């Protein structure tokens, strides 16, 4: 089947990603609450969160190499099983060491699922459809991020924190398992083995990172993800200092997630109107200003307006950075390039909260948002110099460039 034909596989992939991401978004706060119930202090909770992001760092590039030279679909059920098992076993673990182990398993499962599914989207999408399809695919992640924390909050609480957090983790494991029901016929038969290259043709990582557009895509993705993570972690602290109730903070965070979903629903017309380079540059610039604006004491309605606009701007970065990396990477190395992008994301998830904590300790709780503004401002400048859409014009819908020899863009692979 030619790339860009029947898109039923994409809908099934979005549904599966929604369940998988919802389980992870539900489990991560539940892991923290269960660890606290088992006697962990703030430092131990931070270590648990770091293990989730650190372990996949060592597996991302090998998994990307495997996907470049083989099929993508087998990684999806493996990822779901690891996520489901990691969630459920975290719920029955009775020590912090066991929880750290299963948190790492959960992170590894999420990495497997994301690399496999991103590779499918890139490999089975025509070049001019990649922006749109990546945007639709990431709606699944946004839905999971929207629903997961709300579900966790509804289950966790009361006097038995250990019991309710364990229940939330078991439910998260069951939610992840539901994703298996949507993973049938996601990979076209003619985009699997036919896209394989000989192992001896592997492109060195250094060459991938030197490809114009790959570093820009990695930096934009890292910045957007860091902004989302720090916003989730520090907005409750800002709310506490400004006297905003936790329930209102939860609504504000959900508003941000909803705006991100709205952005991805209208991504295609935005690309037609502005082009990829301009859209990525302007949204990173606006996000930088909005992040810095959160540091300014404003009424709740003003904060809500800023977070809605910020969520909309942040919704652009992830799908477009995926396409930027896919189309800039050398032939036969697109899954590896996407794995490097995910490695950058994981590094950001480890380094950004640590840096934010140091900045907040020195300059106050609003200072991390100024730091994020500076990072997004840098990303805006880098995005301005990155390659545009296929055809070089920077606009979606322009005629695609002719695929190069080998696998070509039509065989390219992940988010």
Image (cartoon, rainbow, N blue to C red):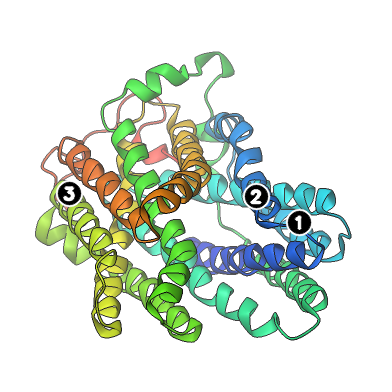
The percent coordinates of residue 111 (x first, y second) are 59, 46
- Disc 3 target residue: 281
In the picture shown, does residue 186 fall above or below 64?
below
Residue 369 at least partly seen: yes
In the picture, measured across the screen, residue 185 lies left or right of residue 177, that is: left
In the structure shown, which secondary structural element does the residue marked by tag 2 occupy?
helix
In the structure shown, which secondary structural element does the residue marked by tag 3 occupy?
helix
Q: Which one is in front, 73 or 378?
A: 378
Contact? badges 1 and 2 (CB < 8 Å): yes
In the picture, measured across the screen, residue 354 lies left or right of residue 316, that is: right
Q: CA distance from mark 1 to mark 2?
A: 8 Å
In the structure shown, which secondary structural element does the residue marked by tag 1 occupy?
helix
Q: Earlier in the sequence, mark 3 or mark 2?
A: 2
Q: CA distance from mark 3 to mark 2?
A: 30 Å
- Disc 1 target residue: 86
User: Would you call the spot at circle 2 few (<14 residues within 10 Å), some (14-19), or many (20 or more)?
Assistant: many
- Disc 2 target residue: 107
């Amino acid at each position: 089947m030619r790339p860009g034909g029947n898109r039923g596989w994409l809908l099934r992939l979005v549904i599966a990603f929604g369940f998988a991401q919802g389980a992870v978004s539900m489990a991560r706060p539940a892991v923290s609450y269960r660890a606290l119930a088992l006697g962990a202090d703030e430092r131990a909770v931070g270590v648990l969160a770091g293990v989730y992001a650190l372990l996949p760092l060592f597996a991302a590039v090998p998994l990307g190499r495997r996907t470049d030279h083989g099929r993508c679909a087998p990684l999806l059920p493996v990822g779901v099983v690891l996520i489901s098992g990691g969630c459920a076993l975290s719920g029955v673990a009775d020590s912090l060491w066991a929880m750290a182990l299963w948190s790492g398993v959960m992170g590894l499962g999420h990495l497997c699922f994301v690399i496999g599914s991103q590779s499918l989207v890139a490999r089975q999408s025509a070049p001019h459809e990649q922006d749109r399809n990546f945007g639709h695919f990431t709606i699944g992640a946004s839905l999971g991020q929207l629903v997961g924390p709300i579900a966790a909050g509804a289950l966790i609480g009361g006097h038995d924190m250990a019991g309710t957090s364990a229940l939330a983790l078991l439910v998260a494991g069951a939610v992840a398992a539901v994703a298996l029901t949507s993973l049938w016929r996601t990979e076209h038969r003619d985009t699997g083995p036919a896209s394989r290259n000989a192992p001896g043709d592997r492109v060195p990582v250094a060459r991938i990172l030197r490809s114009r557009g790959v570093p820009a895509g990695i930096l934009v993705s890292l910045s957007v993800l860091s902004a989302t993570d720090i916003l989730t972690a520090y907005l409750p602290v800002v709310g506490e200092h400004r006297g905003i109730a936790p329930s209102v903070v939860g609504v504000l965070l959900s508003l941000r997630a909803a705006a991100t979903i709205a952005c991805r629903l209208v991504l295609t017309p935005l690309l037609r109107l502005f082009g990829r380079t301009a859209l990525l540059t302007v949204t990173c610039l606006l996000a930088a200003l909005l992040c810095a604006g959160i540091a300014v004491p404003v009424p709740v309605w003003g904060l809500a307006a800023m977070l809605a606009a910020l969520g909309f701007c942040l919704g652009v970065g992830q799908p477009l950075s995926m396409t930027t990396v896919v189309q800039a990477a050398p032939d036969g190395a697109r899954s590896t390039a996407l794995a490097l992008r995910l490695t950058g994301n994981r590094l950001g998830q480890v380094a950004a909260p640590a840096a934010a904590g140091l900045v907040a300790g020195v300059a106050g709780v609003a200072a991390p948002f100024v730091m994020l503004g500076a990072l997004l401002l840098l990303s805006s400048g880098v995005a301005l110099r990155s390659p545009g859409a296929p055809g070089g014009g920077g606009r979606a819908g322009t005629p695609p460039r002719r695929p190069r020899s080998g696998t070509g863009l039509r065989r390219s692979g992940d988010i």
